[in-house]
Image (cartoon, coloured by chain):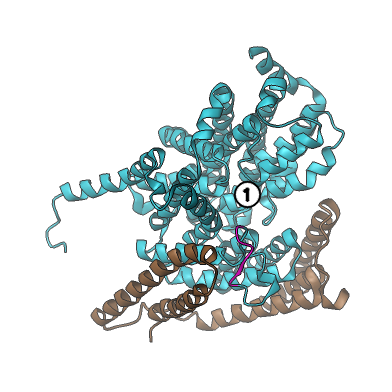
Amino acid sequence: MKVKILLPAVFLLIILSLIITTWGYPEKARLFPLLVAFPVALFLAIDIFREMLAKAKVSSGAEDQLFPAGTLVKHLEAAAWLLTFACIIYVGGLLAGASLFLLLYLKKHGEKWLTTLIYVIAIIVLLYGVFERVFGIPLYRGILFE
Amino acid sequence: MLEAVWQGIASLADPIIILYLFIGIFIGIALGILPGLSGFTGLAMLTPLVFGMEPKTAFALLMGMYSISPTGGSLTAILLNIPGDAVNAATVLDGFPMTQQGHAGRALGIAFTASALGGLFGGLVLVASVPILQPIVMAFNSPERFVIVVIGISFIATLGTESPLKGLISGGLGLLLSFVGFQGMTGFTRYAFGYTYLYDGLGIVPVALGLFAVPQAIELMVTGESISHTKVSTAAMADLWEGSKDVFRHWWLFIRCSFIGTVIGIIPGLGGTMAAFLAYGHAKQTSKHPEKFGTGAVEGVLAPESANNAKEGGGLIPTLALGIPGSGSMAILLGTFIILGIEPGPFLIVNHLDLVFALTTYLIASNIFGAIILYFASSQLTKIAFVRGHVVGPLILILVAVGAYTMEQSILDIFAALVIGVLGYVMRNLGYGTPPFFLGFILGLLAERYFHISLESYGWLFFTQPISLVLISMALLPFMFKWLKALGKPRKAGAL
């Protein structure tokens, strides 16, 4: 199944399950969500139908890709970095975690040590100096330091 | 009255007031630039500090900060595709493509000039409308407010990047997401599925950052290219000036969008994001080249920026005249009046008219001074657009994390922003467009509240109220006009 059909199909399934869930809510809580959900489900069905018709007309599915050709590995790399970022922040907190993430990311992408350190120090100054000291917003410390 | 106007203007000659106004302006610019922080956050943080201050000094600080923060937010919206605040979300649609094409300076020139003049427009309308305020605001009841929200949502189709159908789906999904959590009217919790984090619903800040900033960070991390693909000189004065001239070239659009911003500001509960998107939709609908919108159209930056700042003057109208806050920020401002021992409401205009005009003067002055400061600083700030993607990408992620965390101080908000960001990236790549999703998310609960109140008060035909019908007709007119124009045009040979 092509991705341009797969995504609306997933959305349609979610909306249909939401409609079933909403049906059990009190009247005032379900009325407006249902007024929105039914047309959205209809539009999604039309969208899927249109995409299927378009697929039938175009034999090549070259344009039916989530990512531009040749960038799949780079997208997987970016996804891995996003996951790493979330884990580092959760464990090390915003100050230590963000600095460590920046250091790792910049070194992995070939930045010089001096440039990397300047960016890392700048981000520490911004987070600690501006957010914590000036605005008095305590930043998340992470499960390691809490 | 003239004496009160003069007293308000003359208060700017006081060096203490000027000092506090500029402190406010610098804080406002910083809050606008930093994603996740906004004038609303600033008002909440500064209000406790003004206790015991002389009222005019306190309002110079607050208005200086609050009025300029949307203009500061336009900087990151244009340069980094990160709306500094939700109200800047419409600016990214064309501001950022202009940066990608190497026209960052021109886009900033448009944004700063439109913002300053929009602020001036809103302020002048505020001054002019003081005597005729009450009947106008009181005429807009729930049906009219619901219709205005629906008109806003109908622009979703216009904003859809690939097709109106995908735009409507995206907007509908945003609306449904807004229903997650505790429903104020019934006390019932919807779609939380037992997760306590979802009881209060998703925050606007994590959703905004996720939809607009995270996809940009992913793209930069994937391509490694700088935000601007064209290596031209950064925001030189000539580029900025060109942008300023664009505002005067499109003066009639500027007036219309400022008017939209002011009116939306007057109507309680609609807010700046609505004003910016309505103005954007209006600019696109009335443009001779609507296909250029979303690809770096000058009018696409001008429209939301003028409406954004004009809205502030409009928002002050019901707050000062009736004691009805037009937004959350205005509610905090109303609280400030009480902290300072001044009773808000209709008596404010009677007893403290000089303060009303002083406030208006600070609003106008901070818009103009702030834009001038940004105008001269932007030649350096635009250089951000030429930094390599491998550097900017992770920096954006870090700012997203901090921005998402600051409002509720919840680590789950960071994760929510990242998850929504991935969803936004996928939706964007498949042509669904994230702005309609965000607009739906912002307007969902508001639409539901007005819908239920209207239904209870007027029944199912509530939208047939006279003002509602006029509003619906006004909203349909451009569509009808385009349809009739298309019918009148001879079809091209070979066209389907």
Q: Position of residue B338 (x, y in %)?
A: 78, 35
For the question of whether residue B241 can be seen, the reply is no
Q: Quadrant of the N terminus of chain B?
A: top right
Q: Main secondary structure of the magenta part?
A: loop
Chain given the colour brown = A
Residue B56 lies in what quarter of the image?
A: top right
Dot 1: element: helix
Left or right: residue A10 versus residue B322 is: left
- Say few, some or many: other residues with alpha carbon within 10 Å of mark 1 (under 14 / 14 to 19 / 20 or more): many
Q: Position of residue B192 (x, y in %)?
A: 62, 73
Q: In the figure, B318 relative to B385: above or below? A: above
Left or right: residue A52 versus residue B200 is: left
User: What residue is disc 1 on?
Assistant: B73
Does residue B489 belong to the magenta stretch?
A: no
Which amino acid type corresponds to the residue marked 1 in the rendered image?
Gly
Left or right: residue B439 versus residue A80 is: left
Chain B rendered in what hue? cyan
Does residue B188 belong to the magenta stretch?
A: yes
In the foreground, B489 or B101:
B489
| Span shown in magenta | B185-191
Q: Position of residue B410 (x, y in %)?
A: 74, 67
The residue that appears at 40% across and 69% down in the rendered structure is A38
